[in-house]
Image (cartoon, helix red, strand yellow):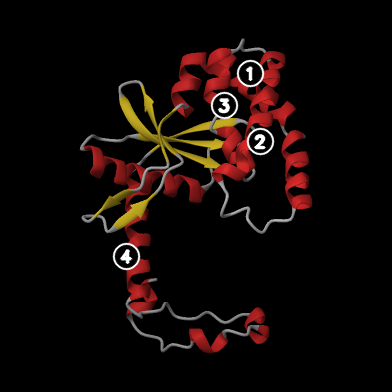
Amino acid sequence: MMIKELAMGYADIVKKTKPTKESILEELSAEFERVKSELDLIYSTELKNVPFNMIETAEKNVFELLDNIATNLSDAVFKRSEVDVIQSIMPHRTEPVLHSDRLNLTGIPSAIVQYGERMAPLSIRTGRCPENGVWGNDRIHIAALSMLLEENSGETVELGFVEYAKEGKIRKVKVRPEDRRQVLKIRDRVDRIKDGNLPERKEGKICEHCNFTHFCINKSTLASKFF
């Protein structure tokens, strides 16, 4: 939660300061203090029963990331331009609920950004950033959000962005037909499971010690071969 809230302010930090690591780090540190003071106001329900020492540990862990985040944001500005970086991550709308009856899908992007004259989904991730591109799951997630945004806006959405918040790295994702195809396949698989058509169970060593084995007993059918 803390790193996600901090990431929401990266665009403003880049916009109002010099593109040097030192200047960005100074603004980032100030933003970090703001996030710390307001976190319980934003996530009052989620933090209600969280011990104070756990919050202190999280604060310490995030603080140790600031130097690397500042370095990567500075590098991005020099490599891509300030305008490009800001447009990639500046929220136009934050966490809108996107639904499509046609797709039978609902999704919530971290934000919608305006990249050039087009709207694009932004997904803020708190995990490790891959060396190149984005993780496969993140690509499919962006594709699904792009399809939902198209349905809600009536405009073609050709790309999205993934922001790996812990490292301050921003990756552009070109949405391909295969990505869209995979979204629909996954949707259909989920629908079949909801209807009670479970895929054929593949037994392994860990099944011997599983307490939920009786829940996934099902007969092998021809249809199950297509999962």
- Secondary structure of the residue carrying tag 1 is helix
Q: Are marks 4 and 2 in contact (CB under 8 Å)?
A: no
* Residue annotated with mark 2: 37
Q: Nearer the viewer, mark 2 or mark 3?
A: 2
* Residue annotated with mark 3: 10
* Residue annotated with mark 1: 74
Q: Are marks 2 and 1 in contact (CB under 8 Å)?
A: no
Horizontally, residue 91 falls left or right of residue 164, namely left
- Counting residues from the start of the chain, the first of labels 2 and 1 encountered is 2
Horizontally, residue 22 falls left or right of residue 88, namely right
Query: In the rendered structure, which amino acid carries the disc numbered 3?
Result: Tyr
Q: Nearer the viewer, mark 2 or mark 1?
A: 2
- The image position of residue 130, as x and y in percent, is 61, 41
Q: Nearer the viewer, mark 3 or mark 1?
A: 3
The quadrant where residue 159 appears? top left
Query: In the rendered structure, which amino acid carries the disc numbered 4?
Result: Asp
Q: CA distance from mark 4 to mark 2?
A: 44 Å
Q: CA distance from mark 3 to mark 1?
A: 11 Å
**Crowd rating for badge 4 (residues with CA inside 10 Å; few <14, some 14–19, many 20+):** some
Residue placed at 74% from the left, 55% from the top? 51
**Crowd rating for badge 1 (residues with CA inside 10 Å; few <14, some 14–19, many 20+):** many
- Counting residues from the start of the chain, the first of labels 3 and 1 encountered is 3
- Counting residues from the start of the chain, the first of labels 4 and 2 encountered is 2
Residue placed at 72% from the left, 38% from the top? 62
* Residue annotated with mark 4: 188
- Counting residues from the start of the chain, the first of labels 4 and 3 encountered is 3
Asked if residue 102 is positioned above or below residue 216 in the image, the reply reads: above
Residue placed at 24% from the left, 44% from the top? 151
